[in-house]
Amino acid sequence: FIFNAIKGCTKNSQTLYAGCTSYNYQYEAAIQSAEAHTYFPVTNSQAGNLVVGSYVSVGYAGNNNGAENRDRGHATVHSYADDVKILSIETLDENNMAVYLDLPEENAFSTAPHVYTEEFSAPIILSTMHWWSGSTDAVRGRHDGSLGSNTDGKHPYRVQGREYMVGGYIVASDTVMDLQADYTKKVLVAPKGVAHSNADATIRSTYSDIGLIPAAEAGENADWWVGDFGIDMGAGSWWPSAEGSGSSQGAGDRVYAGGSGATSGMREYLQGGILGSGSGAGSAYLHCGGGLGLGLWNCLSCD
């Protein structure tokens, strides 16, 4: 927040750097073949959406009672290639391109559909994934910004040597939300030297209460745009403090409040946004729907 304000004269981080927030693609193999290769075939138009140097998985959808489930949390989505780098994208024929992956030949795969039953088969799919830590080390001179584009929504960026928005949440290790009956949320931070805990009573008795996230003006714990945020300099933590009107006003990021039933208990501090968060992502983005035990594919670094 502070360096965006000093260097960019803005509270809205996405006016400077979009981050990897519009890179949520899943493509079926453009060519089905029993032959094994270390590339994945996509159409020419699909190839234009993919970035050499970024990371993808290859596999097939989970079987949800005879229906496909392509959620990246399914192990099958990563069966053939698990979060590997795109090395190059080359012409395959006049209609298709080959996405070459960082795989040894012994891990080559076919694109023939995976057969679950006589009645149900799942096509082989490529799924974009988050970038790996350190991807912005290649930024020239290690200046602020992205390796490719600051605005295309496909690249993470760095500011003052720190990497942000790689396609998954930054999970604050010392900060949680305590949900209130009126849909507000207390922000509780573990002071230096205090053991981190997942027990509600321990958190309430040992963590510091640094701020209050307001409820949406629309009521019913609706999601809302962030107009402004508060910062506790002593704790080194922040919280959305005022509602805005959209992605171009104030901080311009989104609070996903957790729904009308979220009136008690603790929640993780899931910051920044993920592959498909789009214009709602940014430095002041906060997702309030994950319990303290949440650990999904998009829950990444601890801060």
Image: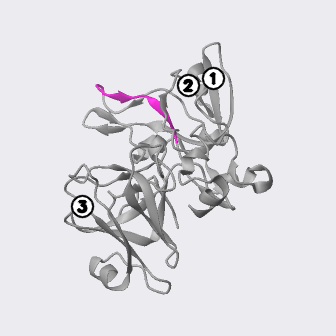
Residue at the disc numbered 3: 183
On whether residue 126 falls in the magenta region, the answer is yes
- Cα distance between the residues tagged 1 and 3: 49 Å
In the rendered image, the residue lying farthest to the top is 94
Q: Amino acid at mark 3?
A: Tyr
Horizontal side, residue 86 vs residue 228: left or right: right
For discs 1 and 3, the disc positioned in front in the rendered view: 3
Horizontal side, residue 138 vs residue 94: left or right: right
The reply to whether callout 2 and callout 3 are in contact (CB within 8 Å) is: no
Which comes before the other along the chain, label 1 or label 3? 1
- Cα distance between the residues tagged 2 and 3: 42 Å
Horizontal side, residue 13 vs residue 200: left or right: right
Going 56% across and 40% down the picture, which residue do you hit? 153
Q: Which residues are magenta?
A: 118-128
The reply to whether callout 1 and callout 3 are in contact (CB within 8 Å) is: no
Mark 2 falls on what kind of element? helix
Going 51% across and 22% down the picture, which residue do you hit? 32
Residue at the disc numbered 1: 97
Question: Can you give x and y, in whole percent of width and height, for residue 195 in the image?
Answer: 43, 84
Question: Can you give x and y, in whole percent of width and height, for residue 256 in the image?
Answer: 35, 52
Q: Amino acid at mark 1?
A: Met
Q: Amino acid at mark 2?
A: Gln
Q: Does the image show residue 292?
A: no
Q: Look at the magenta stretch and give its main secondary structure.
A: strand
Residue at the disc numbered 2: 46
Q: Answer above or below: position of 9 versus 51.
A: below
Disc count in the image?
A: 3
